[in-house]
Image (cartoon, rainbow, N blue to C red):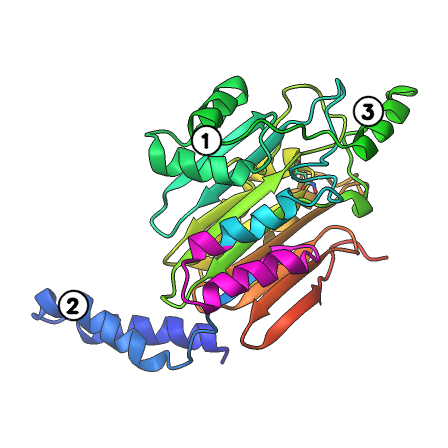
Amino acid sequence: MQRRNFLKNSSVAAAGLISTPLMASCKNNTELNSKAVDTTEPIIPVTICTWNFKNATAKAWEVLESGGSSLNAVQQGAMIEEADVNNQTVGIGGRPDREGNVTLDACIMDKDGNCGAVLCMQNIASPVSVARKVMEDTPHVMLAGKGAEKFAYEKGFEKTNLLTEQSRKEWVEWKKTSEYKPIINIENHDTIGILAIDKNGDIAGACTTSGMGYKYAGRVGDSPIIGAGLFVDNEIGAATATGVGEEVVRTVGSFLIVELMRQGKSPQEACEEGVKRIMAKNKDRTDFQIGFIAVNKKGETGAYCIQPGFTYRSYSNDGHMNNPVDSFLKA
Ligand code: SD4
C-alpha cells in the first residue's frame, strides 16, 4: 500500500476508534494517532525555484541555513533575479511592453496567508520588495500602476530606469514587424517563482516578472495574482508557475495545485494534474509553455510542464540541484 493511502486509512481508523463518548478528546486523539504513524522526518529547510536560477536558490538557502524565515529567503532569492540585467523577464533588463515601457508584476505570500502584490509597476527595481511592503504596511493585497509606484517612493524605493540598452535595442527591432504573439518561446521563460520552508517548518513563496515581452500596455499575467502565479498554505504546501500567464489564471493554477495536495496528491502528482487541466482546455494547442513547481509541508517537491525544456532548482541538505522536469508533450 502506498504510504499516503496508509496514512489516510490510519486516520480513518483512528477517527473510528474514538467515535465513543470521549468526544472532547476527539481532536487530540486524531492528531496523536495520525502523528504516531507519520514517522518520516520533514526534509527541511528547503527552497525551490522555477528554472535554473542557482544564485537565487543559493541566496535563499543562505538565509534558511542561518535560521532565517522562509519569507526572507524567498524575497532575497527573488531579488537576485530582479537585479540581474541579463534576465530579460524579471526586474531590471526585463523586456518592455509594446510601447517601450518595462512594467513589472510581483507577489509574495507568507505562512499566515498574508500576501501582497504589485501589478504593472514601472521604474522600481525590486517589485517583490514593494509587494512585501504592501503586505506588511497596508490593509491591501494589490497595488497597481502609478499607485504602486507612488507607494514605493513613499517607502523609500528609488526611481530606476529598467530599460537596458539590450532590451531597448531588441524592442526597436521588434517594432519593425510589431508581430504580437502572446506565446513565449521556451527559451524566453525567465520568470522566477520561488518557494521555501524554513527550519521552523514555515512556508513562504514569491513570484516576480516583467511578463510577456511586447505585451499590450497594462497587461498583467498570472505572476502577481495570488492563487494563479503563487499560492501558499502553511498547513499543506505551496506552488508557483511560469509560462503563459493567461492560461494559469484561467485555472487558478497554483491554488489548484495546493488544493490537490490537500486532497492527498504528492507535489508531483498535483503539478501533473494542474498541467492536464490546462491542456484539457487547450486540446488543439501545442505552442505554449507552462511550468509548475510545488512543495508540500514535508519538504517533498515536484514539477511538471507542457513542453520539454523546463527545469527547476532545489537546495536542501541533499544538495543544490537543477532538476529536469517531465513534460506533457514530448520532444
Ligand atoms: C506572465 N507568467 O506574465 C508570466 C510570464 C513568464 O517566463 O512566466 N515568463 O504571464
Q: CA distance from mark 3 to mark 2?
A: 59 Å
Where the C terminus falls, by quadrant? Answer: bottom right
Residue 59: in magenta span: yes
- Amino acid type at mark 2: Cys
Q: Residues within 10 Å of mark 1 (few under 14, many from 20)?
A: few
Q: CA distance from mark 3 to mark 1?
A: 36 Å
- Residues at circles 3 and 1 in contact by the CB criterion of under 8 Å: no
Residue located beneath label 3 in the image: 180
On the image, the x and y values in percent for residue 270 come to 56, 57
User: Who's the residue at 34% across and 76% down the image?
Assistant: 10
Element type at mark 1 = loop
On the image, the x and y values in percent for residue 178 come to 86, 20
Residue located beneath label 2 in the image: 26
- Residues at circles 2 and 1 in contact by the CB criterion of under 8 Å: no
Q: Residues within 10 Å of mark 3 (few under 14, many from 20)?
A: few
Is residue 245 something that shows in the picture?
Answer: yes
- Magenta span of residues: 48-73
Left or right of residue 111: residue 123:
right
- Residues at circles 3 and 2 in contact by the CB criterion of under 8 Å: no
| Viewer-side label of 3, 1 | 1
Image quarter for ligand 1 equals top right
Q: CA distance from mark 2 to mark 1?
A: 51 Å
- Amino acid type at mark 3: Tyr
Give the vertical position of 76 relative to 61 (above or below).
Answer: above
Residue located beneath label 1 in the image: 156
Rendered image quadrant of residue 48: bottom right
User: Who's the residue at 58% across and 67% down the image?
Assistant: 315
